Image (cartoon, grey):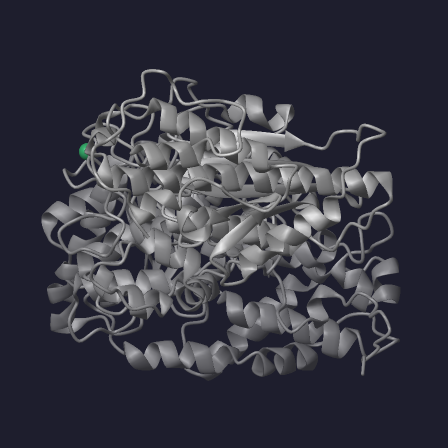
C-alpha cells in the first residue's frame, strides 16, 4: 500500500491532433505536418477550414501552397503549433541569397518513400541538389513508385491525400501512429549539419536567376555542390541526364606587366543598361566575339550568305572564308548585315538586337550587383574585376551566339536540322561567390528554356 | 515589471488543494479483479459501486501503479454524457474531447472512430503497451448503441494488434433501476465480450466486530497508511503524516490505528440515531475528509494533543458529511429489493 500522487493520468502533451507531436520529426515541412495530421485524424477536405482555418480550393497543389503562400502557411502552422524556423522559412534551406522563389518556379512535390510512409516530409527533399534521402539512401521521387502516376496533393473527395491516382497509398496510417520515426536521430543530425552549412554559404553566395526563369530545377541541381561530408549520403545516380551546361570561372592571379585597364572595359559594358542600339566591345573581349561570328559563317550550308554578307564577318580580320564558300544568289539582307561585330574606327560594336534578351539582362544584373565594389589599383581588386569581365564576356558571347543563330535560322531553314547550330535559347543561372572582400568564383549554369518567355 | 515571489517552502500533501489518494483495501481488491479479467482474456469488466466510495479514484490508482498489472496496460479515461442520440459520432467525439483533441466539424462517426483508434495507437507507442484500458465513467447511461460502438473500437484495435479492455463504471445509486435497467442491459453478444465477471466496489470495510487486525479491516489499514506510510518532506528527513500533525503524541507512541475501536463506536451510534443499519462500509470520500479534520484541524491545532475523544470524532464525522451521504443513498433506493 502507498499513496498515489494526484497527477492527471492521461496527459496528452498538449497536442490537439493525433500525430501532431513533431518533436521527433526534425525539420518537417508545413505540408508534411498538414498531410500527416489530415491522414491520422481522418480530416476530409470539407473540414480543412474547421481544423486548420484554410479553405480547400479545388485545384490547389497544397504542397506548393503551404510552402509559399504566407497566409495559408501561417494558418496551418498556428493550428499545429509549428514553430521551428526550418519548417516555416523555405529560404533557410538555400545556400545562397537571392532567388528565394527558385523552388517555386519548377515545383513538384518530391518525397522519400520510406519517410513519407511514416508521415514525414521535409523541404530538404525538395532541394534539386539532394537526390537521395540522406538517412534512408532512397532515391527521391515525384510520382508513385508503383505506377508512376501523380500523387493526390489536394483535398479531393475521390482520393486520399498522399495516395496516387490509382489508389497506391504512399502513407501508412498504422506505421505513422504506432511507431516512432525510424531515423529521427540521423535525420536531425543531417538536417542540422545541412542548415549550418547553408547558413554559412548564404553569407558568401548570391544567386542571380534569369529574368522570367522557366526552368530552375535542373539548373539548380548542377549549380549547387554540397561539401563532401554532406554529398556522399545524398548523391544521386550519375546517369541522370542533364540538359544544362555549367561553367565555373575562378579568380586568377594577375600577370604583371600587362595593361588591363579593367575599369574602362567594364564602363563600356555598363551601356547594357541603356537603350542604345550598339554595344561597344572592350578590346580585351572582342576577339572572342569575332571568332564566334566567322566560325559560324564558315559552318553555314552553301549558298546561305551573299558575298557581301560573308565579307562583313571577316572584315578587318586575318582569317579568310573557307575556300568552299558558295555565295547565295539573292540581294543582301539588312538584318544579316547587322550580325557581325562592326568595325567602327578602332572599336568593335555589336548590335543589341543580336544578343538574346534573357542572357544580356543577366549580364546587366551581374554587373549592377558587383561593379563599384572593387577599386583598383589594389591587385586583389584587379583580379576580382578581371573575373567579373571574364564572366560577363562568357555570358554575352553565348547570348551573341544564340541570338545570331535565331536570326540566321529565319533565312536558312537548314539550320534547324543542324545538331550544332540549331537555334535554341538557354537561360543563365549565375552564382557569385565572394571570399572575404574579393570575388572568388562565378558559376554560370546554362539551362535550356522550357518555353519561350 | 517583473513580479518576484520568494521560493515557497514545500507544502505538506494534506494541506494542498488536491489531497493525495491512499491505496486501500477496496482498491487492491479491484486491482485483483481487473488482473484476473485481463489475464483470462476478457475484453472488459463492469465495476459497480455507490457514489463517493472512490471508484474513480481507485481506477486512477490502478492506472498509476503497474504492480498489479499482469502485463503493461495503458489507461484512458472518458466521461460519458447524456446524448439525445447515441450515435457513433457522439461517442467518438466525447472520447476525443476527453483526450483534448480539437473538435472537427463535419467529421463523420466513422472518421472520428478511426481518429480515436489512431489516438490510442499513438499514445501507447512509446511504452509499447499492447493492452489498452478505456475507463468509462457513467457507463450506466449506455444503451445498446454504445455497446455497439465499443465493439467497433475493439475491432479496430484488434486489427491493429492491440487489445482493448473496457472498465465500465456503473453508479448503483444513479439513473439506474426499474424498467430502464432492463432497457439498458447489454445484448448477449456484448455481455459475452465485455461482462464475463463483474466487480462490486465498496467503501472501506470494517471487518469483524472487535477485529482490529490489518488483514480483516480496511479502515485500520487505511489509518495505518497515515500512521506509517506518508513521509514528508522526503524519505531521509521526513516523518509520517500522523507524526507531522501530532508530533508529541506520536513520539509518545500515539497511532490513529489505536483508536479504530472508538471511531467505529461513534460511527455506529450516529448511524443508529439516524435509523440506518449500524454496520456499513465507510465511503472513501468521507473517510478521507474525516482523517483530514482529525489530523489537521484538531491534532494539528492543539500543541497538547494526546488522543481524540468521542466529541472530537463525532465533530469530524459530521464535518466530513458522512451522514448526509449515507442518508442520501437510502433515499434514492428506499426499498432495495430488486438487487
Ligand atoms: Zn527518407
Ligand atoms: Zn500508383
* Towards the viewer: A37 or A214: A214
**Measured from the top left, where is residue A193 in percent x and y?**
64, 36
Describe residue B296's horizontal placement relative to residue A398 as left or right: right
Tell me if residue B207 comes above or below residue A338 in the rendering.
Answer: below
* Towards the viewer: A205 or B130: A205
Residue B52 placement: quadrant: bottom left
Residue B178 placement: quadrant: bottom left
Tell me if residue A322 comes above or below residue B25 in the rendering.
Answer: above
**Measured from the top left, where is residue B74 in percent x and y?**
44, 44
> Looking at the image, which residue is at 41% across and 40% down?
A217
* Towards the viewer: A334 or A255: A334
The number of discs equals 0
Residue A42 placement: quadrant: bottom left
Q: Is residue B202 visible?
A: no
* Towards the viewer: B244 or B164: B164
> Looking at the image, which residue is at 79% across and 36% down?
A259
Describe residue B129's horizontal placement relative to residue B221 as left or right: left
Describe residue A254's horizontal placement relative to residue A417 as left or right: right
Tell me if residue B74 comes above or below residue A44 in the rendering.
Answer: above
**Measured from the top left, where is residue A315 in percent x and y?**
48, 34
Q: Is residue B58 visible?
A: yes
**Measured from the top left, where is residue A60 in percent x and y?**
26, 58
Quadrant containing ligand 2 reads top left
Amino acid at each position: 500500500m502507498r499513496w498515489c500522487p494526484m497527477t492527471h493520468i492521461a496527459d496528452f502533451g498538449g497536442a490537439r491532433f493525433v500525430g501532431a507531436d513533431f518533436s521527433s520529426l526534425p525539420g518537417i515541412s508545413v505540408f508534411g505536418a498538414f498531410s500527416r495530421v489530415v491522414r491520422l485524424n481522418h480530416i476530409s477536405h470539407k473540414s480543412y477550414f474547421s481544423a486548420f482555418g484554410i479553405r480547400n480550393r479545388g485545384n490547389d497543389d497544397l504542397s506548393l501552397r503551404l510552402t509559399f503562400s504566407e497566409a495559408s502557411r501561417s494558418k496551418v502552422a498556428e493550428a499545429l503549433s509549428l514553430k521551428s524556423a526550418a519548417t516555416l522559412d523555405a529560404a533557410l534551406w538555400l545556400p545562397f541569397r537571392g532567388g528565394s522563389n527558385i523552388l517555386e518556379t519548377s515545383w513538384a512535390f518530391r518525397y522519400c518513400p520510406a519517410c513519407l510512409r511514416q508521415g514525414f516530409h521535409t523541404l530538404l527533399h525538395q532541394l534539386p541538389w539532394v537526390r537521395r534521402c540522406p538517412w534512408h539512401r532512397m532515391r527521391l521521387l515525384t510520382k508513385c513508385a508503383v505506377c508512376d502516376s501523380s500523387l493526390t496533393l489536394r483535398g479531393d473527395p475521390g482520393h486520399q491525400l498522399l495516395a496516387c491516382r490509382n489508389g497506391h497509398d504512399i502513407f501508412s496510417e498504422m506505421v505513422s501512429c504506432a511507431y516512432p520515426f525510424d531515423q529521427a536521430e540521423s535525420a536531425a543530425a543531417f538536417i542540422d549539419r545541412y542548415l549550418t552549412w547553408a547558413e554559412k554559404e548564404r553569407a558568401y553566395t548570391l544567386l542571380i536567376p534569369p529574368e522570367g526563369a522557366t526552368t530552375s530545377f535542373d539548373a539548380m541541381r548542377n549549380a549547387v555542390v554540397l561539401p563532401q561530408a554532406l554529398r556522399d549520403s545524398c548523391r544521386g545516380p550519375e546517369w541522370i541526364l542533364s540538359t544544362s551546361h555549367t561553367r565555373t570561372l575562378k579568380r586568377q592571379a594577375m600577370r604583371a606587366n600587362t595593361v588591363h585597364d579593367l575599369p574602362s572595359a567594364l564602363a563600356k559594358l555598363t551601356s547594357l543598361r541603356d537603350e542604345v542600339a550598339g554595344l561597344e566591345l572592350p578590346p580585351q573581349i572582342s576577339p572572342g566575339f569575332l571568332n564566334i561570328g566567322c566560325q559560324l559563317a564558315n559552318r553555314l550550308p552553301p549558298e546561305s550568305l551573299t558575298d557581301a554578307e560573308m565579307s562583313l564577318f571577316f572584315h578587318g580580320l586575318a582569317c579568310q572564308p573557307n575556300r568552299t564558300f558558295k555565295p547565295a544568289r539573292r540581294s543582301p539582307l539588312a538584318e544579316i548585315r547587322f550580325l557581325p561585330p562592326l568595325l567602327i574606327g578602332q572599336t568593335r560594336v555589336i548590335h543589341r538586337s543580336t544578343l538574346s534578351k534573357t542572357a544580356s539582362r543577366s549580364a546587366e544584373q551581374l554587373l549592377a550587383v558587383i561593379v563599384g565594389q572593387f577599386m583598383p589599383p589594389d591587385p586583389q581588386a584587379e583580379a576580382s574585376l578581371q573575373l567579373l569581365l571574364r564572366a560577363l564576356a562568357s555570358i554575352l558571347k553565348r547570348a551573341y551566339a544564340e541570338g545570331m543563330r535565331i536570326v540566321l535560322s529565319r533565312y536558312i531553314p537548314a539550320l534547324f536540322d543542324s545538331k550544332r547550330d540549331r537555334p535554341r535559347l538557354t537561360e543563365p543561372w549565375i552564382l557569385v561567390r565572394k571570399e572575404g572582400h574579393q570575388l572568388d568564383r562565378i558559376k554560370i549554369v546554362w539551362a535550356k528554356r522550357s518555353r519561350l518567355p | 515589471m517583473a513580479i518576484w515571489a520568494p521560493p515557497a517552502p514545500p507544502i505538506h500533501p494534506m494541506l494542498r488543494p488536491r489531497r493525495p489518494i491512499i491505496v486501500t483495501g477496496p482498491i487492491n481488491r479491484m486491482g485483483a479483479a481487473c488482473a484476473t479479467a485481463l489475464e483470462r482474456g476478457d475484453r472488459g469488466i463492469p465495476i459497480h459501486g455507490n457514489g463517493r466510495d472512490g471508484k474513480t479514484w481507485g481506477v486512477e490508482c490502478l492506472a498509476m501503479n503497474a504492480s498489479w498489472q499482469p502485463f503493461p496496460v495503458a489507461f484512458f479515461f472518458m466521461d460519458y454524457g447524456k446524448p439525445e442520440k447515441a450515435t457513433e459520432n457522439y461517442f467518438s467525439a466525447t472520447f476525443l474531447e476527453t483526450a483534448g483533441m480539437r473538435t472537427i466539424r463535419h467529421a463523420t462517426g466513422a472518421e472520428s472512430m478511426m481518429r480515436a483508434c489512431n489516438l490510442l495507437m499513438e499514445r501507447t507507442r512509446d511504452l509499447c503497451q499492447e493492452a489498452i484500458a478505456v475507463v468509462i465513467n457513467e457507463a450506466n447511461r449506455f444503451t445498446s448503441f454504445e455497446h455497439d460502438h465499443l465493439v467497433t473500437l475493439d475491432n479496430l484495435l484488434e486489427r491493429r494488434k492491440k487489445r482493448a479492455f473496457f472498465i465500465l463504471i456503473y453508479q448503483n445509486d444513479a439513473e439506474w433501476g426499474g424498467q430502464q435497467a432492463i432497457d439498458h442491459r447489454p445484448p448477449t453478444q456484448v455481455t459475452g465480450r465485455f461482462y464475463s465477471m463483474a466487480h462490486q466496489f465498496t467503501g472501506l470495510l470494517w471487518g469483524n466486530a472487535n477485529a482490529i487486525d490489518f488483514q480483516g479491516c480496511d479502515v485500520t489499514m487505511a489509518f495505518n497508511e497515515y500512521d506509517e506510510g506518508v513521509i514528508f518532506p522526503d524519505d531521509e528527513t521526513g516523518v509520517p503524516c500522523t507524526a507531522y500533525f501530532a508530533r508529541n503524541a506520536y513520539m509518545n507512541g500515539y497511532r490513529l490505528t489505536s483508536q479504530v475501536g472508538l471511531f467505529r463506536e461513534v460511527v455506529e451510534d450516529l448511524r443508529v440515531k439516524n435509523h440506518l443499519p449500524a454496520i456499513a462500509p465507510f465511503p472513501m470520500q468521507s473517510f478521507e475528509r474525516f482523517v483530514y479534520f482529525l489530523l489537521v484541524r484538531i491534532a494539528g491545532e492543539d500543541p497538547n494533543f494526546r488522543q481524540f475523544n468521542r466529541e472530537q470524532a463525532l465533530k469530524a464525522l459530521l464535518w466530513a458529511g458522512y451522514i448526509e451521504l449515507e442518508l442520501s443513498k437510502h433515499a434514492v433506493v428506499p426499498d432495495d429489493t430488486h438487487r
